[in-house]
Image (cartoon, rainbow, N blue to C red):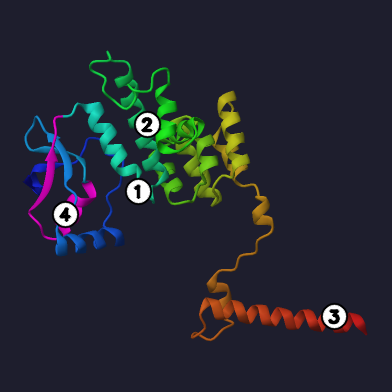
Amino acid sequence: MEIPLSELHPFKDHPFKVKDDEAMMETADSIRQYGVLVPAIARPDPNGGYELVAGHRRHRASELAGKETMPVIVRDLDDDQATIIMVDSNLQRESLLPSERAFAYKMKLEAMKRQAGRPSKENCSQVGNDFGKKSSEVLAEQVGQSKNQIFRYIRLTELIPELLDMVDEKKIAFNPAYELSFLKKEEQVDLLDAMDSEQATPSLSQAQRLKKYSQEGHLTLDMMRVIMGEEKKSDLDKITFTSDTLRKYFPRSYTPQRMQETIIKLLEQWQRKRQQQHER
């Protein structure tokens, strides 16, 4: 059935980000041209209208395409059934952010555990047919991850939003982020301060030490600053110049790529000159 976009509300605590990015604009163009080919799934909202279960991106793309309605399949679903459908419809996407995967795994696992705990007549879920298996084992098989990796992702939901954003932005790698998730919330806030003052993000070994000191009750802001101020091995092998430092030596028309090529040529000439001097 066709339902007005204004009557469709987002799913509560929907973990997937709906961005107006290039992919969204392409979807909007497709809907403008062909309409919505796959109906969304929604359930009646007790407060009026409908709660979207699957189809949040199609809903936004329909708005951008100037549509007033979209095709929707309306189903009576309880909270756990709706959560599992909502997560499954999004997990198939190729480019999921770590935060999206973390909250999706957490929501689905909690829903599966609740379903598994109900009497079999009520429990016609994905878990109900896997007798003797834990919900986490079933979920791991469904998403193609190890049970351990599922729980490592779920640990990321313990990070404060600012740190989790840095994981999504690839400023903090997954493994250090997992270790940082064991820090208390107030320690994570202090870590932001230490990272800012030292202009650094933690490596795996630094994150593991931060976790160790936290668990021992010895982690202070000063200690965080000392740890974050250490030179990483990768930094010892790296020399960085700002464009402002180099710009005065080159014509304005030079691109960064051309500047780099010129520097390499000059260094090669300097090296040849030094070799000639040594041979004399």
Query: How far apart are the alpha carbons under marks 4 and 2?
Result: 30 Å
Q: Identify which residue, 227 or 71, lies in the foreground.
A: 71
Residue 233 coordinates in the image, percent (x, y)? 68, 51
Question: Measured from the top left, where is residue 200 in percent x and y?
Answer: 55, 50
Q: Give the range drawn in magenta.
A: 56-76
**Quick one: label 2 or label 1, which is nearer the N terminus?**
1
Task: Tell me the element at label 3.
Answer: helix
Q: In which quarter of the image is the N terminus?
A: top left
What residue did someone put label 1 on? 93
**Residue 275: assigned label:** 3
Mark 2 belongs to which amino acid?
Answer: Lys
**Mark 4 or mark 3, earlier in chain:** 4
> Where on the picture, by quarter, is residue 81?
top left
Label 1 Cα crowd, 10 Å radius (few <14 / some 14-19 / many 20+):
few
Numbered tag placed on residue 36 in the rendering = 4
Q: Nearer the viewer, mark 4 or mark 3?
A: 4
Q: Which of marks 4 and 1 is nearer the N terminus?
A: 4
Secondary element at tag 4: loop
Classed neighbour count for the residue bearing mark 2: other residues with Cα under 10 Å, few (<14), some (14–19), many (≥20): many
Q: Do the residues labelled 4 and 1 touch (CB within 8 Å)?
A: no
Q: Earlier in the sequence, mark 3 or mark 2?
A: 2
Numbered mark located on residue 106 in the image = 2
Mark 3: amino acid: Gln
- In the figure, 97 relative to 65: above or below? above
Q: Are marks 3 and 2 in contact (CB under 8 Å)?
A: no
Marks 3 and 2, Cα distance to the nearest angstrom? Answer: 62 Å
Between label 4 and label 2, give the one nearer the viewer: 4
The relative height of residue 149 versus residue 92 in the rendered view (above or below) is above
